[in-house]
Amino acid sequence: MAKRAKARIILVKMVSTAGTGYFFPRAKPRLAPKLAMMKHDPKVNKHVLFTEEKMK
């Protein structure tokens, strides 16, 4: 039996850098560079930087 191919799209967890523990899942291509984006964090009620981490 042949090995199965890896998925081209993976799920990552976007975590707030404000230290609140707030996160949201995001799909990205496997070969894309790491994501970082400014989004609203409802726990501190501000726009903060969200960075990518692996989903467990």
Image (tube, rainbow, N blue to C red):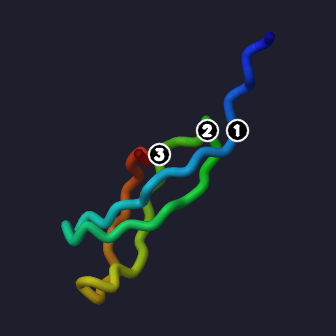
Report if the CB atoms under discs 1 and 2 are less than 8 Å apart. yes
Q: Is residue 18 left or right of 36 when viewed as pictured?
A: left
- Residue type marked 3: Lys
Give the Cα separation between the discs numbered 1 and 3.
15 Å
Q: Which type of secondary structure does the marked residue at label 2 adopt? A: loop
Whole-percent x and y of residue 22? Answer: 32, 70
Please state, as top left, top right, bottom left or bottom right, where the N terminus lies in the image: top right
Give the Cα separation between the discs numbered 2 and 3.
10 Å
Instruction: Give the labeled residue for mark 3.
Output: 34
- Does 12 sit above or below residue 39? above
Point out the frontmost of discs 2 and 3.
2
Q: Residue at x 70, y 38 (%)?
A: 8
| Nearer to me, 42 or 32 | 42
The tag on residue 27 is: none
The tag on residue 8 is: 1
Q: Residue at x 79, y 12 (%)?
A: 2
Whole-percent x and y of residue 27? Answer: 60, 55
Whole-percent x and y of residue 49? Answer: 34, 67
Instruction: Give the labeled residue for mark 2.
Output: 30
Please state, as top left, top right, bottom left or bottom right, where the C terminus lies in the image: top left
Could you tell which of marks 1 and 3 lies nearer the N-terminus? 1
- Residue type marked 2: Arg
Crowd tier of the residue under label 3, counting other residues whose Cα lies within 10 Å: few below 14, some 14–19, many 20 or above: few
Q: Is residue 9 left or right of 33 when viewed as pictured?
A: right
Whole-percent x and y of residue 53? Answer: 38, 48
Q: Residue at x 68, y 29 (%)?
A: 6
- Does 5 sit above or below residue 26? above
